[in-house]
Image (cartoon, rainbow, N blue to C red):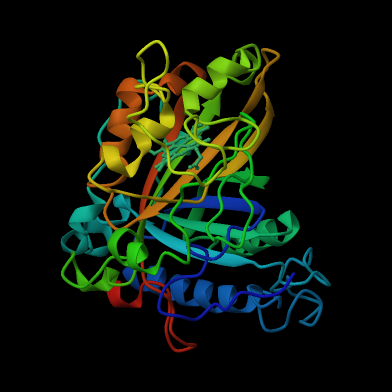
Amino acid sequence: SGSVPFYGGHQAGITTPAQDRLHFAAFDVTTRKRDELVDLLQRWTAAAARMTQGRDAGTFGAVGGDPEAPPDDTGEALGLPPSGLTLTIGFGTSLFDERFGLAGRRPPALADLPAFPGDDLQKDISGGDLCVQACAHDPQVAVHAIRNLARIGFGKVAVRYSQLGFGRTSSTSRAQTTPRNLMGFKDGTNNLKLEDTDMLREYLWAAPGDGPDWMDGGSYLVTRKIRMHIETWDRAPLAEQQAIFGRDKGKGAPLTGAAEFDAPDFAKTGPDGKPVIAADSHVRLAHPSSHGGARLLRRGYNFVDGSDGLGRLDAGLFFMAYQRDPRTQFTPIQRTLSAKDALNEYIKHVSSGLFACPPGVVDAGDYWGRALF
Ligand code: HEM
């Protein structure tokens, strides 16, 4: 229930140990005026600095202002602790067009993602000029934060889509236990973690020389809403489920090992001469050894958006992954997965987003994306 520092060299909400709840929102910028966009980013930053410390979005608060005016905070988080709230902003590919004179500022690493086989992307829940990831241990706190940012942005931005996540599907610190995704498997075992300082430098943070300097110390976020065919999965035998991931369902150990964090042995064969961890298993295909060492910091959430009218749960994984360069990390990994992963029979990618998340806000005189404008 404590607070996470808002100011720092990197934005909070990336290596911050993954909180339990998510409210993610993507916005379209509706104003055409660059100074209005900059003003909004300044006002958002000030509100974010306050809300992440458990305070009201505005200086008067939910009940302290002029009774004849709408309150500058909506009030539903009154009395709630900060709950580990982090607010992380990203700039989408579509922001870098002629509207705001940013076309020449687009980082090469923010290249459009290619289409992948099997994609069934819905435009209305994909993309976005801006995104804000709100994570907290209390869903009311995360929702309150997004709601107030949307309220502050009225007339300048409009919510394009938003996604609630109710359970983390990864751990981003060795101090955390590994949670489970809706397929019942431990997820996040071999993730990039806060303690892996050398690897974070190599695979998470944009560094000087990578691209435009406004992104130095930032990171690139790929989002994919992945629907699971839960009912079909629930009829698959345990042995098949384990073969698909290459891991044991109970402990999360690789099928060649005994404990969760044992390294998988991809060379090991069984009595039938076939590899114990199958050629088309998720863990083999996604493993850094299949991609020249490339890694991701996965930070996804489980979602159940009710049911789909056909008697099935509308459920799955809202996948989010941070990285230094999607061209050499997410894209090659997903290209391999989309072509070969045995898991594909049970999932469908229904949305996609790509965002440049700038470095952290250093102090109260700074604001989200200052170096970009
Ligand atoms: C590993 C589940 C989609 C990248 C894993 C693991 C599970 C899992 C259970 C093993 C535990 C772990 O190390 O975290 C899922 C499910 C998905 C999904 C249910 C879709 C619904 C994706 C996508 C990507 C991805 C789209 C990236 C393009 C990875 C990576 C690993 C991993 C890099 C670590 C592999 C290793 O180093 O051993 N996933 N995953 N996953 N997944 Fe996924």
Q: Is residue 234 left or right of residue 331?
A: right
**Above or below: residue 140 compared with residue 117:** below
- Residue at horizontal 50%, vertical 29%? 255
> Can you see residue 215?
yes
User: Number of marks in the image?
Assistant: 0
Q: Determine the residue located farthest toward the front in the rendered image.
A: 271
**Image position of 350 with respect to 59: above or below:** above
- In the picture, the quarter occupied by the C terminus is bottom left
Q: Is residue 137 above or below residue 58?
A: above
> In the image, 170: left or right of 117?
right
Q: Which residue is at 71% across, 75% downward?
A: 54
Q: 199 or 75, which lies in front?
A: 199
Image quadrant assignment for residue 252: top right
Q: Position of residue 367 (x, y in %)?
A: 43, 78
Q: What residue lies at 42% left-to-right and 18% top-to-bottom?
A: 270
- Quarter containing the N terminus: bottom right
Q: Is residue 230 above or below residue 330?
A: above
> Residue 122, can we see it?
no
| Residue 360 locus on image (x, y percent) | 42, 75
Quarter of image, res 232: top right
| Residue at image location 41% in from the left, 48% down from the top | 128
Front-lying residue, 308 or 173: 173
Residue 42 rendering spot, x and y as whole percentages: 46, 77
Q: Is residue 333 left or right of residue 278?
A: left
Q: Position of residue 146 (x, y in %)?
A: 61, 59
Frontmost residue, 147 versus 232: 232
Who is closer to the viewer here, 71 or 256? Answer: 256
